[in-house]
Amino acid sequence: MLPEMDYVAHNITSFFVAHGQPLFLYTGFGSLCICRIQEGVCDMAQIQVTDLTFSYEGSYDTIFDKVSFLIDTDWKLGFIGRNGKGKTTFLNLLLGRYEYSGGIHTSAVFDYFPYQIPDGLAAECGAELLDQMKQGCELWRVLCEMDALELDAEVLYRPFDTLSQGERTKLMLAVLFSGENDFLLIDEPTNHLDQNARETVKRYLNSKKGYILVSHDRDLLDACIDHVLVLNRQTIEVQSGSFSSWWENKTRKDAFSLAENEKHKKEIGKLKKASGRVRQWADQNERTKIGFDPVEEHDRFLGTRSYIGAKTKKMQSRVKQMEERITREIEEKEGLLQDIENPVDLKLFSLKHHKEVLVSAKDYSLAYRGARLPVLQELNMELRQGERVFLNGRNGCGKSSLIRAILRKASDSAWPEDFAVEKDVCDESGLLTVASGVTISYVNQDTSFLKGGIREFCVCRGLQESLFCAVLRQLDMERAQFAKNMEDFSEGQKKKVLIAASLLTLAHLYIWDEPLNYIDVFSRMQIEKMILSCQPTMLIVDHDVRFREKIATRVMSL
């Protein structure tokens, strides 16, 4: 039960009903909190975070500063926030992996996805790793969950390192949900998954409850959650509903805040002008107290000094009242825009090529030596200038292999030297051609090769450091991050490094291989807007349904 009932009663911000229970939001400790009302009693949620403060040792920035909120372990909670705001960090704090100040009070037992499999054990089969993933895990429960995930039981008896990304994800989720009464922390489960696997995971999570889901996939969030926990720019917000309902509420709230801000600015301007005029009149009146011309001012005498002084004092009191009102207006204006998302418009300047068709394939097949089946077989395609073609298909169908083949054919490709394209491990037949002189800007799905600082990266790529950092700032990376080595960046921040480098590369064709993995929702919308505005020629592999629906001019299934 809340001890500060009077405080709560005077700070209720909104009221709603979820799952038949009345709920209200109240502002507390600089954040928004949720409580459930039961027969007049305000009952705390099962996870209470109070004055949580945390920063990494040696880091310039504070991740959490006196943060407080309440959540219920019965919810399907979506966790939303920009890259680097501390979503994964908070999950690790719940797991007790870091020291912090403040309090996290709960009786819940946590489990975390994805499980970390040591390199020395990756060659063992899944059945032998069950206890390594989740201690006391029962095989029959895992098999039940695997069936719900449409995963064959034989996957358990194959070496773990031979499983596809989708098979690994489904197996780990089956193990995760095989326990009882755990509150589950699920960190971006759909990265690198094809569309079919995503749909399966989406249906599966929708049938469960009692978890925090960190994801930037808007389609997944809308399908799977009933509450959102949002790390805004300055505050933390808990709200009932899906991502779309939260985004609609945020859009309306931001519009109201902007309108209120404009109203306060106008009122402050009027008050300052009026205050200046009255102050000027008071000063002029004060100067007439001493000395006067008896001919010109025949009605003046020494006794009028007290009258003039009283009149001046009254004017000065009016000025003081106006200044106090200005101060109140400024205080009301402060905080209105603290959580406004107003991203800068990104720019991309692509080159024009003299040929209409940039890439073409005719009866093209590709097979890796030693493999039983070709990864691509009798492919026919054309990529024309101005098109934004999305490659679609299950994991392992050859999307990345086709991209590598195109990079090998291109005579002038702006793709990282760190990424090795194997030239002697595959056999090709048919025809794959890239127009002569085509410059390609490439975003790799792998970020593991990013090492060292921003300056060294810019020198290696031939980029202007100040301009590169400006683009990263537009993608909402804090300046404090620029002093770190890139291996210490979050995965989303690493992806932003690659995207920024691609945006600054003049090219005829932009090939992006899963560019949005780990990228936050706000940056996704920002990138969508840029592509629609600049209209570059692109070949893209990405499984974000909303992104593809908005951007693609054509979808090519492999």
Image (cartoon, grey):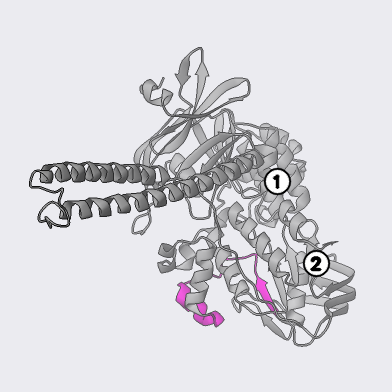
Q: Position of residue 338 (x, y in %)?
A: 45, 49
Q: Is residue 327 above or below residue 538?
A: above
Name the quadrant containing residue 409.
bottom right
Answer whether residue 454 is magenta in the image: yes
Q: Residue at x 46, y 15 (%)?
A: 41
**Label 2 CA crowd tier, 10 Å (few <14, some 14–19, many 20+):** few
Three-letter code for the amino acid on which mark 1 is drawn: Asp
Judge left or right: residue 424 versus residue 132.
right
Q: CA distance from mark 2 to mark 1?
A: 35 Å
Residue segment shown in magenta: 440-463
Q: Is residue 520 in view?
A: no
The residue positioned farthest toward the left in the image shown = 302
* Secondary structure at numbered mark 2: loop
Q: Earlier in the sequence, mark 2 or mark 1?
A: 1
**Rendering coords of residue 37 (x, y %):** 51, 19
Q: Nearer the viewer, residue 117 or 290?
A: 290
Residue under label 2: 371
Relative depth, front residue between 17 and 164: 17
Q: Quadrant of the C terminus?
A: bottom right
Q: In the rendered view of the protein, which quadrant contains the N terminus? A: top left
Element under disc 1: helix
Q: Is residue 118 magenta?
A: no
Kindly identify which residue carries mark 1. Answer: 219
**Number of disc labels:** 2
Q: Return the residue nearer the eye: 275 or 238.
A: 275
The residue that appears at 68% across and 56% down in the rendered structure is 192
Amino acid found under the numbered disc labelled 2: Ala
Counting from the top left corner in percent of width and height, residue 369 is at 79, 72
Does 277 appear above or below 358? above
Quick one: which residue is furthest to the top in this view? 39
Residue 40 disc label: none
